[in-house]
Image: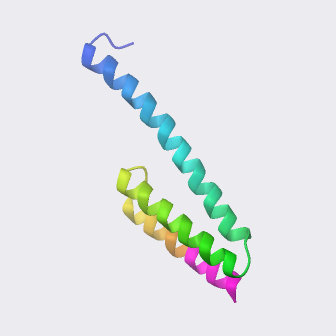
């Protein structure tokens, strides 16, 4: 247990951030799963929503920007396969 005041505060902040990041990452996984299981035009619109969520997570620092780009690319490929 930390006994320095600033570290005690940092531990509280880290816990809050960890919970928020976990929620966002779980939502991203759900959005990706929906895109992969969808068919036709629905897959395209779900992919657009998932892309937006990935970009938001990257801008907040929850995901690295290249990780977000890679996942967006794979989702777009999956949506295109489903649409054709």
> Relative to residue 71, is residue 38 drawn left or right?
right
Q: How many marks?
A: 0
Residue pictured at 59% horizontal, 51% vertical: 27
Q: Which image quadrant: the C terminus?
A: bottom right
Residue 68 screen position, x and y as percent:
45, 63
Residue 54 screen position, x and y as percent:
48, 61
- Overall secondary structure of the magenta section: helix
Spot the residue most to the bottom: 84
In this rendering, is residue 61 above or below 80?
A: above
Residue 44 screen position, x and y as percent:
61, 78
- Residue 38 position by quadrant: bottom right
In this rendering, is residue 58 above or below 82?
A: above
Report if residue 77 lies within the magenta region.
yes
- Residue 58 position by quadrant: bottom left
Residue 74 screen position, x and y as percent:
56, 73
Residue pictured at 53% horizontal, 42% vertical: 22
> Relative to residue 61, is residue 35 drawn left or right?
right
> Relative to residue 60, is residue 46 drawn left or right?
right
Spot the residue most to the top: 3
Magenta residues? Answer: 75-84
Q: Which image quadrant: the N terminus?
A: top left
Report if residue 35 lies within the magenta region.
no
- Residue 80 position by quadrant: bottom right
In this rendering, is residue 13 above or below 43?
A: above
Residue pictured at 62% horizontal, 60% vertical: 31
How is colour applied across the structure in the image?
A: rainbow
């Amino acid at each position: 247990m930390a006994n320095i005041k600033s570290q005690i505060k940092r531990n509280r902040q880290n816990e809050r951030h960890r919970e928020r990041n976990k929620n966002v990452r779980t939502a991203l996984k759900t959005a990706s799963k929906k895109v992969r299981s969808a068919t036709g035009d629905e897959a395209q619109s779900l992919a657009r929503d998932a892309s937006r969520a990935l970009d938001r997570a990257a801008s907040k620092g929850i995901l690295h920007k290249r990780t977000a780009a890679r996942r967006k690319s794979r989702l777009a490929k999956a949506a295109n396969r489903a649409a054709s």
